[in-house]
Amino acid sequence: MPPDQSIKIIDSHTGGEPTRIIIAGIPDLGSGSIAEQSNVFRSQHDWLRSSVANEPRGHDAMVGALLLPPSEPDCLCGVIFFNNVSTLNMCIHGTIGLGVTLAHMGKITTGIHKIDTPVGVITLNLHEDLRVSVNNVPSYRLAKDVPVDVPGYGSITGDIAWGGNWFFLINEQGPAVRFENIAALTHFTSMVKLALADQGITGENGMEIDHIESFGPPTDPTKADSKNFVLCPGNAYDRSPCGTGTSAKLACLYADGKLLPGQTWRQAGILDSVFEGQVAPLHEQHCIPTVSGRAWIIGESTYHFSPDDPFRHGIISTSV
Ligand code: PYC
């Protein structure tokens, strides 16, 4: 990167979970699909991910995004999400953040907009009250009641589901899903993640299950149907109810016949912020989840990269 180059970012948060969108200064990632551009970004420009997501500019919970021209016709823009360790397949809290960011930039008004992502085209609907609804990629449960032997915790049973990322969904096992248990929940879910990898339990085509979701009863049943704790790749927990995790949950409820098309599921996260979700049937037990939530713009910055700054490209995270 030339010494005088800088990038511009806009920060938002969705139910407490940050999204930092790079809106200018993105290197040329070629003219391939957004999935191909994501590979180029990961293999050739990882310094940019690290500069934005890691300390001193970021922190372990930071989710970043590149705002790109679309590669698919009819799409408003392309987006590649990333976090403290790598790129993400998909991110719904980040797409809700993208909606308010595009509105803040004057690029969209209320209504439906198509977005090009590495795992397919999705739509976001910006409502008058600035809530955003995201129609996710097709989601489904791959396996139900899968046992995994977790050192220190014994046999834990969960469902494996795709909601744009691979999830292992655990119901009412391990530490209670409460804010004061965040350290214990982080330990529990990271042990589950390691055990899944050790025991060769994966998503479709051997894909790593890199998000672990633990469920418990809601704090206030008048406001939510369930409360979750989600461990993300990089070992930070999602401050929001995790939109792809909510999609995975909706797919499991749908497969069990517990959520009918058009019914609303209110998923609270560990901070008690709530996403609302519905499913539309697709084929067999596959569905298209819609997840709605609220994001707020919290800042805009220009980042500089002084050649003599030893941490200009971030402090590389040691967590995995
Ligand atoms: O909201 O989908 C989501 C998400 C994925 C990782 C962090 N948030």
Image: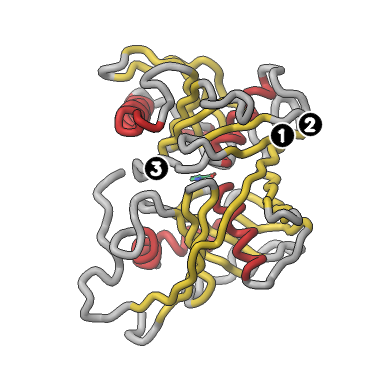
Q: CA distance from mark 3 to mark 2?
A: 31 Å
Q: Position of residue 39 (x, y in %)?
A: 47, 58
User: 133 or 155: nearer the eye?
Assistant: 133
Q: Amino acid at mark 3?
A: Pro
Q: Residue 278 shows which numbered tag?
A: 1
Q: CA distance from mark 3 to mark 1?
A: 26 Å
| Residue 213 location (% of width, % of height) | 47, 30
Q: Is 262 left or right of 7, judged from the image as shown? A: right
Are there few (<14), some (14-19), or many (20+) residues within 10 Å of tag 3?
many
Q: Amino acid at mark 1?
A: Gln
Disc 2 residue type?
A: Gly
| Sequence-first tag of 1 and 2 | 2
Secondary structure beneath label 3? loop
Instruction: Please say which color scheme the image uses.
Output: secondary structure
Of the two numbered discs 3 and 1 in the rendering, the one whose residue sits closer to the viewer:
1
Q: What residue is shown with label 2?
A: 262
Mark 1 touching mark 2, by CB under 8 A?
yes
Question: Mark 2: which secondary structure?
Answer: loop
